[in-house]
Amino acid sequence: VDFNGTATAAGKVNIVAADARALGDIRALTPEQLERTKQKMRAILTDNLPQTSAEIQFSDLMPPMAPTPRNAALHAHRVHRVHKVRHV
């Protein structure tokens, strides 16, 4: 397993891990978009290969955040600061 958590195996082309886990996050603009994404991910899990199983869990730690003028102003301010620091 390397620094990024990627594992490789050599010698056989049909090696299947007994257990695998993946962690990630979902960034959404609206609650509806978040729910649609979760439903699509759940649907993917229903198409398992023979003798395999899958499960998914969601922990909603960050709420969806739609674009607003205030968000855009904050983003522009931060981009300007980063650009200024890089060109000093």
Image (spheres, rainbow, N blue to C red):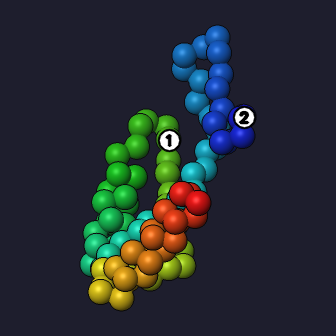
**How many residues crowd mark 2 within 10 Å: few (<14), some (14–19), many (20+)?**
few
Q: Quadrant of the C terminus?
A: bottom right
Give the residue at the far bottom of this rendering.
Answer: 70
Of labels 1 and 2, earlier in sequence is: 2
Which mark is drawn over residue 52?
1
Q: Nearer the viewer, residue 24 or 66?
A: 66
The image shows residue 11 at horizontal and vertical percentages of 64, 11
On residue 1, the disc is 2
Compute the Cα span from label 1 to label 2. 23 Å
Q: How crowded is mark 1: few (under 14 residues within 10 Å), some or many (20 or more)?
A: few
Nearer mark to the viewer, of 1 and 2 = 2
Q: Mark 1 falls on what kind of element? A: loop
> Can the viewer see residue 66?
no
As drawn, 14 above or below 69? above
The residue depicted at 65 percent of the width and 15 percent of the height is 10
Judged left or right of residue 23, residue 28 is left
Q: In this view, does 13 lie to the left or right of 38?
A: right
> What kind of residue is marked 2?
Val
Residue sitting at 67 percent across and 42 percent down? Answer: 5
Q: Residue furthest top?
A: 11
Amino acid tagged 1: Thr
